[in-house]
Amino acid sequence: DAGVTQSPTHLIKTRGQHVTLRCSPISGHKSVSWYQQVLGQGPQFIFQYYEKEERGRGNFPDRFSARQFPNYSSELNVNALLLGDSALYLCASSLGQPRAHSPLHFGNGTRLTVT
Amino acid sequence: EDQVTQSPEALRLQEGESSSLNCSYTVSGLRGLFWYRQDPGKGPEFLFTLYSAGEEKEKERLKATLTKKESFLHITAPKPEDSATYLCAVQALETDKLIFGTGTRLQVFP
């Protein structure tokens, strides 16, 4: 069975540019979440989407935005990139509705480097 | 504020030398505590969910336990392939987001 897939795997961008990261959840999973993991730290919550609606947002600036499509795949967009945005961006999907007992399953992430 | 603290930051074990990893947490109503394993360059791999104090779960050489303030991940007779970073996360009742600790980096030497 295919797990959570993310693309691209690696990306190098320049300060001020814009980036779009993509995620396909596990088949049957309707909830998608995005996390940012800086080297040496645990993942930090950015967004959660369920049935194409935003259900949660972490403490990130408005330069970060996301959306979920009818097929439950998702995009994370980051505008006006800063050096501090360099990180591993993780997408996770889960089976259940919000507030349900359903673990998150993570993809292998997109490594973003901002120069 | 919901918070997770993991200790130690790093742990070096000889193959077969059992040990425990600690995860202390504060959360406004616990819905679940999660353990993940993360290999370099990979995403976290789900291991266990614990929901209430006193609960225990096992998988091969790993056993996770939960109290009202902390969780332990016990590793029995570890092998070099158990080397990874182990992440603990909590999920509060009123939200779906996971709050992660910074992880314990485990190295097992033959």
Image: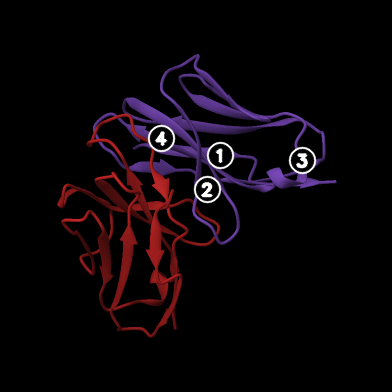
Chain colours: A red, B purple
Instruction: Say which residue appears at 35% left-offset and 49% top-offset.
Output: A26
Image height of A76 relative to B52, above or below = below
Mark 4 vs mark 1: which is more N-terminal?
1
Labelled pair 2, 1 in contact (Cβ < 8 Å): yes
Evaluate whether label 4 is on the same chain as label 1. Answer: yes
Secondary structure state at the residue bearing disc 2: loop
Tell me which amino acid carries mark 4. Val
Circle 1 crowding by C-alpha within 10 Å: few under 14, some 14–19, many from 20: many
**Count of marks, rendered view:** 4
The image quadrant where one finds the N terminus of chain B is top left
Percent position (x, y) of residue B16? 82, 34
What is the spatial separation of the Cα atoms under label 4 and label 3, in whole angstroms?
27 Å
In the image, taking residue B110 as reference, residue B85 lies left or right, namely left
Label 3, on which residue?
A: B79
- Give the numbered dot on residue A115: none
The answer to which of B107 and B25 lies nearer the viewer is B107
The quarter of the displayed image where residue B13 is located: top right
Evaluate whether label 2 is on the same chain as label 1. Answer: yes
Protein chain holding label 1: B
Instruction: Say which residue appears at 32% left-offset and 66% top-offset.
Output: A22
Circle 3 crowding by C-alpha within 10 Å: few under 14, some 14–19, many from 20: some
Mark 2 vs mark 1: which is more N-terminal?
1
Evaluate whether label 4 is on the same chain as label 3. Answer: yes
Label 4, on which residue?
A: B90
Label 2, on which residue?
A: B102
Mark 2 vs mark 3: which is more N-terminal?
3
